[in-house]
Amino acid sequence: MLDPENLYEVDSDVPDLTGAVLLHHLDGFMDAGSAGGALVEQLLSGYEHRVVARFDIDGLLDYRSRRPMMTFVTDHWEDYQAPELVVRLLHDSAGTPFLLMTGPEPDFRWEAFVDSVRHLVERWGVRLSVGFHGIPMGVPHTRPLGVTVHGTRPELTAGHDTFFNRVQVPGNVSGLLELRLGEAGLDAVGFAAHVPHYLTQSTYPAAALVLLDTIVQATDLVLPVAALAESSRRADAEIQRQVAESDQVAEVVAALERQYDAFVDANDKQNLLVDPENIPSADELGAELERFLAEQQRKPE
């Protein structure tokens, strides 16, 4: 394997980051409700930031499977949206530095990439690496959202409910990074917000908000919640309006509520997954909500 440091370039002016937290969210795997993506957007819009490490994207990305956008104007190419896989330095509301790694999930050289991130974690003295995204679940939007939590030590996940015993899922770089960091004796956790399966294709701010709250609890970072809380309130109000306008939607949501409440009353949280035999299809509600959203977008301000 090539030297992991050959996969990235580090800024020459990086301050002492000993004890900092590394947050990471990579595009390309699963992010129901755009939960992780919305949180990244909120962090980057809420704080000043600068790139402190940049990965060699040419060696990691399959451009033909995820073609970057180009802009053509009249008779020439005007712009090319070059993909970036970078680590940015931010400071929270208390002035505490933290790191945020974002960009497309690598298509190639997963082990080399993960090893490179581990080198950066050790180089900078990162105390905790945190991945976050959204996953679809058979739950209604009218009930509190859960979070699946996993980590490299039991102490890192203490106090959180477990929803799975043993399950196999498609591999992803963030999961592999957590696994390899744990094998190296480094602390890492991952948070997956539970998104109602009929809202997975929409941006669902409530899921980003629950991720933010969970990250704050795990890291002690002081991060803004007001903007996401307001976005969540508006989105929930719009969803409620859409449900009220469709008997079919209301019926599906009511069925999910009954199942959710029955499982909670029985303290059987491990079964809050989509059961195709007992839960209505996501298409039944998703199609209705998408139609309402499309109509809403066409309405004048």
Image (cartoon, grey):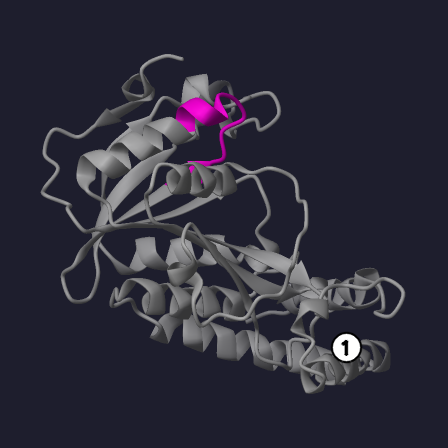
Q: Is 108 within the magenta?
A: yes
Give the image location of residue 129, x and y in percent. 34, 48
Residue at left 34%, top 20%? 7
- Horizontally, is 300 left or right of 119 in the view? right
- Horizontally, is 228 left or right of 35 in the view? left
Mark 1 = which residue?
256
Task: State which quarter of the image contains the N terminus.
Answer: top left
Count of numbered marks:
1
For the residue pair 269 and 212, the one nearer the viewer reads as: 269
248 versus 37 height, above or below: below
Q: Residue furthest right?
A: 277
240 versus 111 height, above or below: below
Q: Indicate the secondary structure of the residue bearing disc 1.
A: helix
Residue at left 21%, top 28%? 10
For the residue pair 46 and 178, the one nearer the viewer reads as: 178
For the residue pair 70 and 145, the one nearer the viewer reads as: 145
Residue 275 visible, this angle: yes
Give the image location of residue 118, x and y in percent. 32, 34
Extent of the magenta region = 102-113
Give the image location of residue 253, x and y in percent. 76, 78
Residue at left 46%, top 22%? 60
- Horizontally, is 255 left or right of 192 in the view? right
Task: State which quarter of the image contains the C terminus.
Answer: bottom right
Label 1, residues with CA under 10 Å away: few <14, some 14-19, many ≥20: many
- Label 1 amino acid? Leu
For the residue pair 280 and 72, the one nearer the viewer reads as: 280
Q: Is 31 within the magenta?
A: no
Give the image location of residue 3, x and y in percent. 31, 15
Residue at left 37%, top 28%? 115
Residue 82 visible, this angle: no
